[in-house]
Each structure stands twice: as C-alpha cells, then as structure tokens.
Image (cartoon, rainbow, N blue to C red):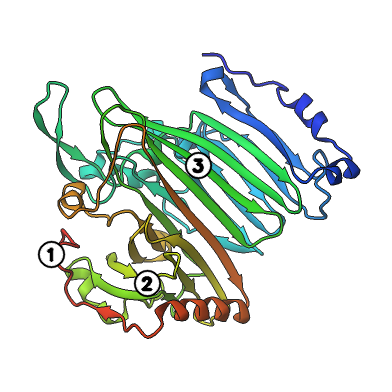
Amino acid sequence: MKFQKENFYDPFLKILSVKNNYLSFFMSVTFNQVITDVDQNLWIDSLELNEKNLSTNSSSNWEIKKSTLQGGLQQGVDLIEVNNGVFSFAVVPTRGMGIWRGSYSGKTLGWDSPVKDLVHPAFIELNDRGGLGWLKGFNEWIVRCGLSSNGAPGNDVIIDNNGNKAEVFLPLHGKIANIPARFVEVQVEVGTSTILRIRGIVEESMLFGPALRLTTEISTELGSNKLTIVDEVTNLNSTPEEIEMLYHCNYGPPFLEEGSKLVAPVKRASPRDRRARENVTTMSEFCGPTNGYVEQVYFYELLGDSRGESKVMLRNKAGNLGTSMIFSLEQMPCFSLWKNTASLKNGYVTGLEPGSNFPNPKRFERENGRVVLLEPLQSRKYKLSLEVQVGSDAVREVEREINQLQGSTSPEILEFAPEHLSAAT
C-alpha cells in the first residue's frame, strides 16, 4: 500500500485563505482535511492549520498541527496537536485516538509516567507479565479501555469457530488503545463560534469474533476551558456482540498533590479490595508522593441531575485549581477512582474513570449484568466533557454545582464491597 505524502494539502490551504467578509456571509462554514483514509490509500505526513492560512475572524492564537514521530518505540506514531488559544491537547490516532497530554493556561493535564514515549502498538504485547502488557504503553491523559473487554486480566468463555465453548484469556483493559485509526479527519467549523474538531474511526475486528467500530469526535471551542469527546460504538456483525467502555482519565501535579480532593455527588461508594479498605474513610483525599505505595481502587454509584448527568472534580489543596468532568449516568453508570500516589519516578497519578462497567474481569461483570449487548448493526453513544477551573471562584462554583447534585442525600460509604460489585477480596 503506497500512501500519498507530499504537498497533498497545499491546494486545500489555498482554499482556506478566505476573507473575513466571506465568512460573515454564512452562518457557519466547515473546513475539512482528511489525514488518514485506508480505503483511499491516503495518509498525510504533516499539516499545519492556523489563523495565517485559515481566517476565522479570531484574534486567538489557535493551531492544529499533525506530525509523525520518529525514533525508538515511537517510530511511526501519528500525533495531532490542537491548541484553541488557551487549551491544548494531543490526539494519538496510532493509539486508538487516545489523548496523550494537555495544558490549560500553562497547567499540565496528564501525568509523568515511567513510560516516556508514545509507544507504537507494534511494540506492545498485551499478554506480557500475566496480561499486563497494556501498561508498557500507558502514559496518556485520557485513554479508552475496551471495546469488547476491559478491566483486570482474567479468563472468559467464548464460542469458537467450531461452535464450541472455549476458555480464553483476556488481558488488562482490552485492545482499542493499541489499534491505529483507519480514518482521521481534521475539521474547523467557523460560525458564531469556532470549533476545532478531530474525527476518527478505529475498528476492533476479527474473523469468528467481535467486529466493533469506534467513531469518535474530539472537539473544543476557541478560547474555551472545555474539551468534549463524543464516541459511538457500532456492532458491524450480523450477530449480537458484547461491549465494555471505560475512560481512564489520569492526573498528576499540579491538580494532584498532598491535600487534593475528589469532589463528587456520592450515593454509595466502596473499596475494591483489602488494600483499598485500609483508607476507606479517606478515599476522596490524596497524599503526596509516597515511595512503595500500592494502588487503591474505589467503586462509586453517583447521583445525577434531572437529565441523568453527573459531575465530578479533582481539586488541589488550596482550592484554586480544579479539573472536572460531566457524563451521562445512563451511558456510564459506573465510576471508579484509581489512586496510585507512588513516588514521582514511579508514576504519581490518580485516575477518574467513568464507564459502562467496573474494571473487574469481564466474566464477573457479565455475571452481574454490567456488560452491554449490542444487536446487529446497533450502536451505543458515549459523551464525556472535561473542563479546567483556574482560580478559587471557578473551583467554588463547580463545588456548588456538585453539592446541589448531592442535595440532602447522605453518602453511603461501605467498608466492604457488595459481592456483585467487586471480584477482588
């Protein structure tokens, strides 16, 4: 397969050099540039879009830049960097359209993983270390876990190509984060506001197995503090297929520090296992970097508003810096908190994880009714909005909104997880 690389987008950039009065004539104009299209044998090595070659009537110093990384384990990884003027983030089509890192007003979004490079999936063996090979590429700010499975490694039973039951091993967090996108497109929508959008399609499929398509849109408005992810998972088979989806959203300093706190409207929460029970009364509070720290995980049932949406926030000790997320409890009724406040060199991080299921082995989640079954050609949508709060007033406002969701309901904090919630002991 030979890809087009040289000067493909030059004519496109000339078209984008429009005058301000042309844009004002229309309510909204959307410019598109395809980066990757496997069906058309198309791939673009590099691209730069900004106010100089695409007039949006904005004084914002925005930019979309596509590059291809070289050297070491990142050889051949596609990277799309988006900057709306104050909020920047990097989408990785080669790694399932995950989001590597971000920044808002100079505040880093993401974490410092022991995995320093963006590792190409070709160098990942998911079954390494008893099914923990996924961790060899794990350094993203936001990474999807799925599509056909996620959660802890474990055995499952499938129907094989001969129609017989067969036991198979499912590694940690599934495959989607290590599958390159087959279609990627950049969009700039110019209207009363300007939206920067990255679209992608990633397929997890095999003969005699799941055939699932992820269609994603990752967008931000110029000058905003918000990033929105809208995903659609489609069963391409003519037989029903199971799906699991979890968004592993990971934060280190400056949002995570000694004294940081998770603010959430809690109906019920419980520790995953014996280790998590050690600090169950302070599960929402974080310690500083601790050498030898062993991860703790807590499972939450959250409260929502009249539309069924919930909101959580991680804020720093001083209460003048926070990051929040909004999601549908119908789409993602399960929320997990991963605390890994180890030393800085070992990966000081916490994960806020809304999902359609808890990150237990798939077999356990199925037995307890949390694995989604998609009928032939049926789709399921997931939407996640992430915002950053800078300043005490902004943080207090989000805390007020979350307290409104909490209302008069007293959180139920369980010392032991109910049998239907956790497969661990």
The quadrant of the image that shows the C terminus is bottom left
In primary-sequence order, the first of circles 2 and 1 is 2
Label 1 SS: loop
Circle 2 or circle 3, nearest the eye? 2
CA gap, disc 2 to disc 3? 27 Å
Number of numbered discs visible in the structure rendering: 3
The type of residue carrying mark 1 is: Glu
Q: Taking 197 as reference, is 279 above or below it?
A: below
Is 279 displayed left or right of 163 in the figure? right
Crowd around label 3: few <14 · some 14–19 · many ≥20 (10 Å): many
- Counting residues from the start of the chain, the first of labels 1 and 3 encountered is 3
- Out of 348 and 83, give the one closest to the viewer: 83
- The residue sitting at 81% across, 53% down in the picture is 58
Write the residue at 44% across / 59% down. Answer: 250
Confirm whether residue 74 shows in the render.
yes
Q: In the rendering, which numbered label is found on residue 303?
A: 2
Residue assigned mark 3: 216
Taking 319 as reference, is 56 left or right? right
Seen at 61% across and 76% down, the residue is 394
Q: Position of residue 72 (x, y in %)?
A: 48, 35
Q: Are marks 2 and 1 in contact (CB under 8 Å)?
A: no
Amino acid type, mark 2? Leu
The one of 250 and 212 positioned closer to us in this rendering = 212
Q: Are marks 2 and 3 in contact (CB under 8 Å)?
A: no
Based on the displayed image, in which of its 4 quarters is residue 293 positioned?
Answer: bottom left
Say which element carries label 2.
Answer: loop
Name the residue beneath numbered marker 1.
419
Residue drawn at (57%, 79%) of the image: 397
**In the rendered structure, which amino acid carries the disc numbered 3?**
Thr
The tag earlier along the polypeptide, 2 or 3, is 3
Question: How many C-alpha atoms fall within 10 Å of the one at disc 1: few (<14), some, or many (≥20)?
Answer: few
